[in-house]
Image (spheres, helix red, strand yellow):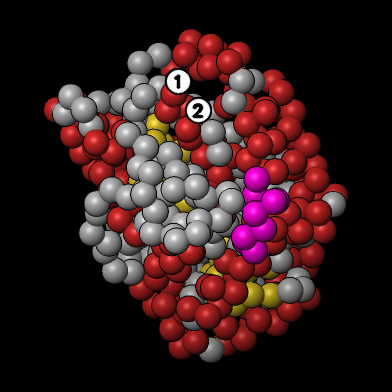
Amino acid sequence: MIGSRKGGHKFPAAAIANSINTEYKTQTCARVINFLDHFPLMSFFDRLGRWGDLKIKFAWRAGYAGLTDKNSFFVRLYRQGIRMVIGQPSIEKKLREVIGDIDIIVSMQPEINAIAGIMKEWFPVPFHTLIMDYSAHAGWADPDIDRYYVVNNQVRQQMIDYGVLPTRIVVTGAPAQPGYDIVAKIPIEKQRRLLGIDPGLPTVLVMAGYLGKMVDYVGIIHSLKKNIPDMQILVVTGKNKRMHHRLIKFAYPNIFPYYDIPSIHPVMRAADLVISKPGGMVIADCLAHGKPMLLVDPRGGALQELIFASMIEKAGAGRHLTSIQEIGKQTRDLFKNRKGLETMAEKSFSCGRLNRSAARTISKLIVDDIIKVQKSQTPKYLKKDTTSHLSSPPLYLSALGGGGENLPRT
């Protein structure tokens, strides 16, 4: 279940559903349900949120900081506000029409996690969640969530700090978008030929998220071409048709714009370096491919993405740039010092070890749970666990319980 138009929620949901429908097609099937497709009020709030992200960044960053700082009043307000909007009986009636009979719910967003208890009253099945973010906040935690899939041990520890028992958390990595396995086997030079570009030129991929509005494309391209005139630049504009048309008319040679492409993997595979805002999805895909990154501060107010960029820089898999003026020089230096670029790529590939199998890992755990529940008349973990390892649980975390999984190392 998702409630967003952004790729960071859409694509990992599609990756898990695709894995289930491919690996277990004779046992079960998975569907991605987007709340926004069925509830106009929620779609309105989503559009309002995206507007606010771009226009009132300070408010968005203050809100995220409130969640990460364990501000109990703010988290309580956050949850209650969401429940007022999507925890209503009219939502239940419509969801029953849309969903039908189900065996498990997998949430991709904290907004849906906030109504986990209500959802389990409507649909008495296990409730899992995937946290695609490389840094989590308290809004993800809920006592009615049976299992958390997280991208690394840092997020695991954050969720423990927010009151979740370790036995309910599995470190799986972040699923790459569907189609990764096929493209990852193609040599880079061959992939460039398949795209119709020069296999021998330095190649950079520029991205700005699924909606294509979170970086200054034109400024980045000017900076790159000023410093490396003979490079080729693949530019994915997402859903931003206006920018795509603008780039088609660019006077610079070797600019290849792509609009609303079905998969990022062919162009990412062909690149030596990826320049993007530091979204969770693009980072997950880059790490899976082992691509070095230059991560630019987003135009919006997504404080968490600044945290992601810092994490990537510390891991040696990329660099965090606060100004697009730095991009051209940094890129030129990396291509001159190929050893540095190769080291960054090796670090990226190492960090993406779990990502390359994350969709399969998560889909297996989901299907195993479905089978377990079907075999059990009274599945224990469907009953709310009223124990907690917190002696004095925070106001917004009443009695978070546990299941039983071994945690793989990152």
Residue at 43% from the left image edge and 83% from the top image edge: 343
Position of the C terminus, as image quadrant, is: bottom left
- The part of the chain drawn in magenta is 68-76
312 and 385: which is toward the camera? 385
Label drawn at residue 356:
none
Q: How many marks?
A: 2
Q: CA distance from mark 1 to mark 2?
A: 6 Å
Inspect the image, locate mark 2, and give the three-letter code of the amino acid beneath it.
Ile
325 and 167: which is toward the camera? 167
According to the picture, the residue beneath numbered tag 1 turns out to be: 122
According to the picture, the residue beneath numbered tag 2 turns out to be: 118
Residue 67's image quarter? bottom right
289 and 298: which is toward the camera? 298
Can I make out residue 176 in this image? no
Mark 2, Cα crowd under 10 Å, few <14 / some 14-19 / many 20+, is: some
Residue at 55% from the left image edge and 78% from the top image edge: 313
- In the figure, 83 relative to 251: above or below? above
Left-right relation of 307 to 323: left
Residue 86's image quarter? top right
- In the figure, 245 relative to 350: above or below? above
Q: Would you say the residues marked 1 and 2 are in contact, meaning their CB atoms lie under 8 Å apart?
A: yes
Residue 394 at what x, y percent from top left? 56, 56
Inspect the image, locate mark 1, and give the three-letter code of the amino acid beneath it.
Trp
77 and 307: which is toward the camera? 77
Residue at 67% from the left image edge and 27% from the top image edge: 85
Can I make out residue 4 in this image? yes
